[in-house]
Structures are given as C-alpha cells and as structure tokens.
C-alpha cells in the first residue's frame, strides 16, 4: 500500500496549494497582495488543479479497490471527497470557459466553487488534525461493515458523541443558510430588472485614491488639439447618459442589470471641441498603477463613458469613486477605476493586465 500512501500525500500537498491559492483569490485583500507581488495566482491555481485532477484520475481505481472492503467510514470519506472534487472541476471548467456559457450559469459556477470550498474546510481540519496527531476518531461501531446497530441508537438515546455530531451539522446548515442569502440575488426571481450578482472588487493596489467630492480632476493630454483638465463641476454641465448593462470580468463572474450613469466620452470631446491627433489612447488610473489602452474609435464611437453612478448611487471608494471608465462591449478590466487622465499617442501600449496577465488588448466580450 506504499503507492496509495504516496498518492495520499501528493494529493494532500496539491490540495493545500489549491485551497490556499483559491482563498487568496477569493478575498479582495489577499488577491491585491499577490497582484502587488506580481505573482500569477490565477495561472498557478489552474495549473495546480490540472495536475491535481490528473493525480485523482490515475489513482481513483486503486483507491476504490482499497476502500471496497474497509469500514464504511473510509468508503464514505472517499465518496465525499470525490463528490466535492467533481463539483470543483465542473464549476472550474465552466469558469475557465465562461465565454461559452450564459452568464447566469458562470455566476452560479463561481458561487458553487467558493461555497463547496468553504463547506470542505471543517472536514479538512478534522481529517488533517486526525492524521497529524494519529488520532483515531471514535466513530460509532455501526459505521463499520457488518457491525450491529448500537444499543444507544436502538434505544433512541442521545449520547455525547451524537450531540457533538448534531451540533456540527447545525453549524454546517448555518453556513449553507448564509450562503443561500448570497445566492438569492444571482437568481432574483422576484424582480428581473434588479441587479443580479456581486462585484468582487478587483484592485491591483492596496492603497487606491480616496478622493473628496471636489478633489478629483480629469485630464485630456498627449496628441490632441486642445489639452484640457476638467473638474467635477465641468462634468456636471455635460448631458448625462444612463445605460443598464451586464458587467463581465474575464475571470468568470458577472453582475447583471447594472444601471450606470455618467457622460459619454464622445460628448466631452464634441462639447469642448477636442479632437485627437493620435490614433491610440491610454486611460490612466489615479492609483498610479493601473491603466489600459484603446483605439480612438473604440473610445469615441462605441459608447464608452465616464461612469459616476451605479444603480443611482455614487460609486463607493473601492469601486472607483468618483469616476470609472466603462466600455459597454468590453470586459471589466477595461473599466479603469479612479480614471484621471487620457493620453493620446501614436503607438499603442499594452495595458496593465495585458502586460502581467496576458489579457487580450481589445478585450471585447
Ligand atoms: N484602477 C483599477 N481599475 C480596475 C482594476 C484595478 O485593479 N485597478 N481592475 C479591473 C478589473 S480586472 C475588473 S473585473 C473591474 C472590477 O470592478 P470592481 O472592483 O468594481 O468589481 O475593475 C477593473 N478596473
Ligand atoms: Mo477582471
């Protein structure tokens, strides 16, 4: 059984790497840290999972052969693991190939991927602690094959062990209950026009600008006939434009039916007689790190706008207050938050995520 023992260890190490990278990706703060370190966490997670799935696939038969005649508890243990692994793989594949699935489905996949990870953590703790300290958990005899049902069950008595089991089940259901609360807005059957899903708040820097209401300015620079800096007051003179649109991130999550209010970039340019003299433009964030690039026509002819409100509310600081760029036909990474400057150029640079994450330059949905 040497081989199975080794597989168990390899499986354990890979699993911990997946769990850690997954949790780091899940929490906005840790995700930002890894962005700052320029550690490619998403590719790391994906490659580790491919390796992991391969190990599972090749060992599945011998594992099942091994547990076939073992106590039920071992058998259920493997079954439990395989079920979870199956769910992670299916949802992970849907997330990776999200362009081929409707956004409702990828949203559910993102949600389940996280949910099942959290549900797994209590089991993992018990399992690991048991192995590390060589604890033999006092599972009731009737878990074992061919053993008779114990008296306590036959007599319908509740002993301490059962009490602990019921309590942990209760906690588990609380978990699930909390998760269902998160889940509800994804479906939102009651009001089909309401926003569905959650923004996951993606920032590549820990300290982003937190502007006061009047502090922010927006500058048009580089190859234009008329370089100009706008204040918030200037922006408020311009005609407003409202759209209801679906916001998609390339990592697979979406937020559907977001009402966005702002001004069209094109309106600013016509109103102030600004005409670009270079074919490309870079949009810079006030966080001094993030930026992305467009062709002039993508920015002026395709409905790109400076957005000030989501669903009738000012943007929150973490989501770009007071202003973020938005292109209705492109992925979320084109939506530069805390946008403070456009620079027109002769050459097209790569944006932040094109440089560090290999994202597509244009980013059309
Ligand atoms: N300044 C700045 N803008 C940014 C980002 C960023 O890290 N910094 N992330 C982009 C990405 S990849 C996405 S998906 C969206 C996420 O928007 P949210 O944080 O409001 O959910 O913002 C985009 N704009
Ligand atoms: Mo994104």
Image: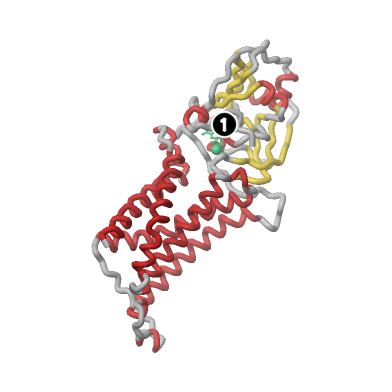
Colour setting: secondary structure
Quadrant containing ligand 1: top right
Determine whether the residue tagged by mark 1 lies in a helix, strand or loop: loop
Picture quadrant of residue 230: top right
In the visual, does 145 lie left or right of 257? left
In the visual, does 217 lie left or right of 355? right
Quadrant of image for the N terminus: bottom left
Q: Which residue is mark 1?
A: 360
Q: Residue furthest top?
A: 225
Image position of 208 with respect to 119: above or below: above
In the visual, does 156 lie left or right of 181? left
Q: Nearer the viewer, residue 295 or 245?
A: 295
Image position of 118 with respect to 78: above or below: above
What percent of the width, then of the height, locates residue 314? 63, 37
Q: Nearer the viewer, residue 18 or 319?
A: 18
Mark 1 Cα-neighbour bin, 10 Å: few <14, some 14–19, many ≥20: few
Image position of 310 with respect to 360: above or below: below
User: Which residue sits at x=70%, y=24%?
Assistant: 300
What percent of the width, then of the height, locates residue 278? 64, 14
Q: How many marks?
A: 1
What percent of the width, then of the height, locates residue 57? 42, 56
Task: Tell whether circle 1 marks a residue whose Cβ is less than 8 angstroms from ligand 2.
Answer: no
Image position of 26 with respect to 76: above or below: above
Q: Residue furthest left?
A: 133
Residue 322 seen anywhere in this rendered image of the structure:
no
Quadrant of image for the C terminus: top right
What percent of the width, then of the height, locates residue 328? 68, 35
User: Which residue sits at x=49%, y=66%?
Assistant: 173
Residue 61 seen anywhere in this rendered image of the structure:
yes
């Amino acid at each position: 059984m040497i081989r199975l023992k080794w597989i168990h260890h390899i499986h354990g190490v890979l699993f911990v790497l997946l769990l850690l990278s997954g949790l780091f990706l899940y929490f906005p703060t840790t995700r930002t840290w890894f962005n700052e370190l320029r550690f490619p966490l998403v590719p790391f997670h994906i490659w580790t999972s491919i390796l992991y799935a391969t190990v599972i696939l090749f060992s599945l038969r011998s594992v099942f052969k091994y547990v076939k005649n073992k106590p039920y508890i071992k058998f259920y243990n493997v079954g439990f693991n395989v079920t979870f692994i199956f769910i992670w793989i299916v949802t992970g594949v849907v997330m990776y190939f999200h362009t081929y699935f409707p956004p409702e489905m990828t949203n559910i996949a993102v949600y389940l991927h996280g949910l099942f990870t959290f549900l797994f953590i209590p089991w993992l703790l018990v399992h690991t602690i048991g192995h590390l300290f060589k604890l033999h958990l006092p599972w009731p005899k009737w878990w074992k094959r061919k053993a008779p049902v114990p008296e306590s069950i036959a007599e319908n008595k509740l002993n301490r062990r059962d009490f602990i089991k019921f309590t942990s089940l209760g906690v588990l259901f609380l978990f699930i209950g909390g998760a269902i609360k998160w889940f509800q807005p994804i479906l939102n059957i009651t009001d089909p026009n309401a926003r569905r899903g959650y923004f996951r708040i993606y920032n590549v820097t820990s300290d982003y600008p937190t502007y006061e209401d009047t502090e922010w300015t927006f500058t048009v620079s580089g190859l234009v006939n008329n370089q100009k800096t706008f204040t918030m007051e200037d922006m408020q003179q311009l005609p407003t434009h409202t759209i209801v649109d679906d916001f998609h991130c390339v990592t697979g999550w979406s937020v559907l039916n977001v009402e966005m209010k702002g001004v069209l970039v094109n309106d600013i340019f016509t109103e102030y007689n600004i005409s670009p003299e270079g074919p490309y433009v870079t949009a810079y964030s006030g966080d001094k790190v993030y930026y992305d690039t467009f062709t002039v026509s993508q920015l002026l002819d395709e409905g790109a706008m400076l957005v000030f409100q989501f669903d009738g509310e000012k943007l929150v600081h973490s989501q770009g207050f007071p202003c973020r760029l938005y292109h209705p036909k492109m992925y979320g990474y084109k939506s530069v938050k805390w946008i403070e400057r456009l620079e027109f150029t002769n050459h097209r640079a790569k944006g932040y995520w094109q440089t560090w994450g290999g994202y597509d330059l244009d980013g059309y949905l």
